[in-house]
Image (tube, rainbow, N blue to C red):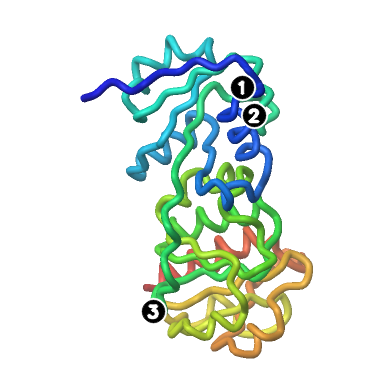
Amino acid sequence: MTSPSVTTIHSRDNAFVKDLRRLAQDSTAYRKQGRVWLEGDHLCRAAVERRQRPAIAVFSESFWPLAQVEWAQVAPKIIVISDALFAEISGLESPARMGFVIDLAVPAGLQADAATVVLDRVQDAGNVGSILRSASAFGFRQVVAVKGSAALWSPKVLRAGMGAHFALDLIEGVEHAELDALQVPLLVTSSHAGDWLHRAALPWPCAWVLGHEGQGVSPVLEARSAMRIRIAQPGGEESLNVGAAAAICLHASGAAR
């Protein structure tokens, strides 16, 4: 196996460092660069387990001597940067010691008959990442984000997704009308109306529509839904966090297949 090239950088004005800083700190920089930044060994391991090969592996200067045992051949290009520079770039309160730059694949087209999760303007990055993990866990392979949803490949969503991105077909920036191409029934979540989830005969495959944290599912999607579903809450709470509701609904669908 050919040894990767190793470059050490100490200057904050280096062009690669500037690009990396944007990827780490700007939620939509990936759209311009066509690459994403995965920070921390846990997320990097999750990507490798999903058969992702980084274009560039980045290590802090103090960690690189230790990292060579496991990570020396992980990427064709290795960048080693000073600890202070890594801390400056990092989007974490406690900066990690390594990260990967991964090239984004060209997004797949909408699969009309796939088990799907639709994010209807879900805006919190933590919620979106949690939903991606649930989608992957319970057999949904397509996630479609309507315009107004959090950027799917932003650093915060990537961290919350913990590797689930690489098991899913992700499509973002979709208009409501484009969802007419889906040939599976749409199921919308509701806090006040519809069939009780634990009693409903859930179709498979289907498309679960999960709505905005405050406004819920948009009227246009609710109007074209095949079913409205609500979750029994015997404890008396008014509503559930959308990430929690998604996990419950997607698990119910997966279990009913």
Residue in view at x 57 percent, y 52 percent: 31
- Disc 3, SS: loop
Residue that numbered label 1 is attached to: 86
In space, the residues marked 1 and 3 are separated at their CA atoms by: 44 Å
Q: Secondary structure at mark 1?
A: helix
For label 2, the SS is loop
Q: Is residue 57 above or below residue 199?
A: above
The amino acid type found where label 2 is placed reads Ser
The answer to whether 101 appears left or right of 32 in the picture is left
Q: How far apart are labels 2 and 3 at the CA level?
A: 40 Å
Tell me, yes or no, whether the two marked residues, 2 and 1, touch with CB atoms within 8 Å.
Answer: yes
Image spot of residue 11 (x, y percent): 63, 17
How many badges with numbers are in the image? 3
Q: Residue at x 55, y 60 (%)?
A: 247
Q: Which residue is pictured at 58% across the width and 25% down the height? A: 96
* Residue that mark 3 sits on: 113
From this viewpoint, which residue is outermost toward the left? 1
Task: Between residue 168 and residue 60, name the one nearer to us.
Answer: 60
Q: Badge 1 local density, few (<14 within 10 Å), some, or many (20+)?
A: many
The answer to whether residue 115 is left or right of residue 156 is left
Density class for disc 2 (Cα within 10 Å; few <14, some 14-19, many ≥20) is many
Question: Quarter of the image containing the C terminus?
Answer: bottom left
Res 15 → quadrant: top right
> Who is closer to the viewer here, 194 or 18?
18
Against 257, residue 64 (above or below) is above
- Using the image, determine if residue 74 lies above or below residue 133: above
Camera-side residue: 162 or 233? 162
* Tag 3: amino acid: Asp
Point out the tag, 2 or 3, that comes first from the N-terminus. Answer: 2
- Residue 201: x %, y % from top left: 47, 83
Q: Would you name the residue on which mark 2 appears?
A: 90
